[in-house]
Image (tube, rainbow, N blue to C red):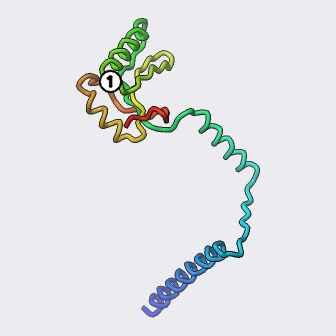
Amino acid sequence: MKTVLIITISLFYIIANAQDNAKNIFNKLNDNNGGDIKVYQSPQLRLAMEKQFASIDNKKGIEGYRIQIYFGNGKSARQKTNNVRVTFISQHKDTKAHIVYDNPYFRVKVGDYRTKSEALYFLTQIKSEYPDAFIVPDIIDVDNTNK
């Protein structure tokens, strides 16, 4: 029992001392004397970060959600896709409709929602018109996000 008590007290002392050391480091950084922080990183890490930033810039949007209201393929799929889009736009003028072609499928996706809950709210409004509609993750236009 004594050893458990000694170990417990020792751990509390070590944890308290570590927190004081961390506070001292931040106090030194905030001194009026200033200071320099140097970060050393490998060239491979820098290259990986630059590639990641470039891929984000190339997406031309952010990760978000859209609602897919039509999905089809075949000879008449292109015309049906256009008809669904035109019908949707005439009913919901404030919401953008996007036609996506991913060989061999045509899709109509609507809206630009940052959160899934925003997309779910709109889905409940259009579910009676488009019973097969569902939410899909997508890259959305930042300027066109629905309110």
Residue 14, given in percent of the width and then of the height, sits at 55, 83
Residue at x 59%, y 76% (from the top left corner): 22
Where is residue 25? Give x, y as percent.
Answer: 64, 75
Nearest the eye: 70 or 11:
70
The residue under label 1 is: 92
Amino acid at dot 1: His
Q: Residue furthest front?
A: 32
State the image coordinates of residue 48 (x, y, percent, origin top left): 68, 45
Q: Is residue 42 above or below residue 83?
A: below
Q: Is residue 134 left or right of residue 55?
A: left
The single residue placed furthest to the right in the displayed view is: 43
Q: Is residue 42 left or right of residue 111?
A: right
Q: Residue at x 47, y 85 (%)?
A: 8
Name the residue located 30 percent from the left edge and 24 percent from the top edge.
132
- Quarter of the image that includes the C terminus: top left
Q: Quadrant of residue 31?
A: bottom right
Element class at badge 1: loop
Number of numbered discs present?
Answer: 1
Q: Quadrant of residue 94?
A: top left
Q: In the displayed image of the protein, which residue is found farthest to the bottom?
A: 2
Percent position (x, y) of residue 7? 50, 86
Q: Quadrant where the N terminus lies?
A: bottom left
- Depth order, front residue of 15/24: 24
**Which residue is the extreme one toward the left?**
128
User: 110 left or right of 22?
Assistant: left
Q: Mark 1: give few (<14), some (14-19) or many (20+) Cα within 10 Å.
A: few
Which residue appears at 33% of the width and 15% of the height? 87
69 relative position to 145: left or right? left
